[in-house]
Image: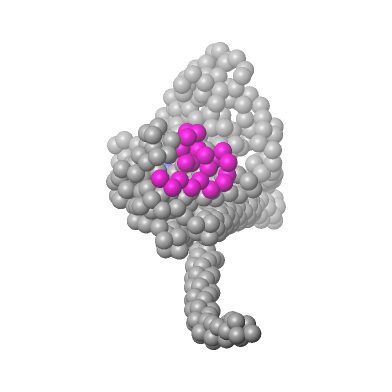
Amino acid sequence: MRRRSKAGGTAKVRGKAAAPKRRRSSVARDDAEAARLARALDEVQDRQRATSEVLSLISGSSGDLQPVFSTILANAVRLCDANTGAINRFEGDGLHLVATHDMPAAFTELRKKGPYRPNQTSASGRLLATKAPVHIVDLTADRAYLDRNPPTVAAVEIAGIRTTLAVPMTKDNEMVGSITVGRREVRPFTDKQIEVVHNFAAQAVIAIENGRLLNELRQRTYELGRSIAELQRERTNKLMNLEAMAASIGHEVRQPLAGIAANGSAALRFLGHTPPDLDEVRQALDRMVKDSYRASQVFDNIRALFGRADQKHEPIDVNDLARDVLHALHEELLNVTTQVALTSALPPVMGHRGQLQEVLVNLVRNAIEAMDSVKDGPRVLQVSAERHGNNAVMVAVEDSGPGIEPTQLESIFDAFITTKAHGMGLGLALCRMIIERHEGHLSVAPAHPRGAVFRVVLPAGRLEPQAGQD
Ligand code: ADP
């Protein structure tokens, strides 16, 4: 009984003494648990802050990946309690180092010399093969180091790294790069730290994809802008062509129409004479017929100019063409000394006779008008035709007028450029258009000692030259 009671008493006494101890240890456990939970919560919040920092950088990024990569690395290194970090991008020719954190300049210089092609024993080679994280607790004991793998040797001997963790960045199961964090001591990374780097790798892929899409969008927008500008230019050109066509019709037809009107009233006047002066009437009517023929030819020429390029093309002897034009303008050439230098046996050119005639008429008229201003000194017009190279002929129209300002040598071929009070500034624009539609070239240069020389070069046609011409 005593024993029992002793035992019981003892038990009671023991129970009384143990209670505060147990309470103390459970309180301590609770405190430790609370501290652990608080630490875990801190860690989670820290990770969330880092993630949202990176994501907000990505969403506000204008496509520049560098700040995103730097922030990713700084956070990865901090959250993993590491010393260094690096991001490599994998492109066709190997791994390119694109960002580092706390790596010595010598290491970066070495790696930036060119892409690195990983071999199988290297950490990157293993990453490529498995697309799973590669965790090397002691680099100096690793195959990659023992095989003297250059980036591993550099990591150990230049950057002093001992423990490393490389996590692949993958998109559609393809490796696009890697994030590496390193420690300058031998201490393995925890599973949580590996998971942290994993998350950052996923964010780096989002950043790359985002940058790619932005660049693509920019490129598309640029191309769209360019094609809109091209369309606008084309539209302006078309309008310009329409405007030029309308203006040139007016310009070319005005002269014969004015001639018809003047000759019509002259004919009426001569008919009113007593007796009617029939001879004069006949001459006026004759001129009216010629003018109306010329007006209809203008329409034909313009229609051909805006129609198919090779419409009504025929073999043309440029010597004949030049002679015909000079003959047609002989009255306007009365005060001018005309020198003609044609070359016999020139190959014919294939072209539209009316249009080529228009070109020469325009060039000769411009020359005559330019020489109108010459008060002293000779007024000399030189028209020549010769071979140009093996397969072309050249007709040149040279005058001894005031010439053309060197700065205007090209712009005078633009439409609506004129120095004449009643000029339209269309003649040379149409001439160039005609010649280019004949696959030829029209240019101007200063003549010596003064004046201007216009040169028309046309490809020779396939027909045999006709002999016996001057
Ligand atoms: P327009 O004769 O209606 O002015 P063109 O296109 O034929 O139109 O000529 C444009 C301008 O080029 C002329 O106004 C003139 O200033 C200049 N030009 C053309 N030919 C000559 C020339 N032979 N010598 C000097 N200037 C010329």
Task: Give the x, y percent position of residue 453.
Answer: 40, 36
Residue 337 in view here: no
Judging depth in this view, the residue of 252 and 221 nearest the camera is 221
Identify the residue at the far top of this view.
Answer: 467
Task: Give the x, y percent position of residue 125.
Answer: 50, 38
Task: Give the x, y percent position of residue 356.
Answer: 58, 34
First to last magenta residue range = 113-138
Which quadrant: the N terminus?
bottom right
- Which residue is depicted at the point 57% across and 16% down? 465
The number of numbered badges drawn on the structure is: 0
**In this rendering, is residue 410 above or below 348?**
below
278 left or right, relative to 77: right
- Which residue is depicted at the point 36% across and 48% down? 161
The reply to whether the magenta stretch includes residue 123 is yes
**In this rendering, is residue 395 above or below 238?**
above
Judging depth in this view, the residue of 114 and 274 nearest the camera is 114
Judging depth in this view, the residue of 273 and 294 nearest the camera is 294
- Which residue is depicted at the point 63% across and 46% down? 173
Judging depth in this view, the residue of 433 and 279 nearest the camera is 433
Task: Give the x, y percent position of residue 18.
Answer: 52, 82
- Which residue is depicted at the point 58% across and 41% down? 130
Can you tell which quarter of the image residue 384 is in? Answer: top left
> Is the image coloured rainbow, by chain, by secondary structure, or in one colour?
one colour
Residue 395 in view here: yes
**In this rendering, is residue 316 above or below 451?**
above
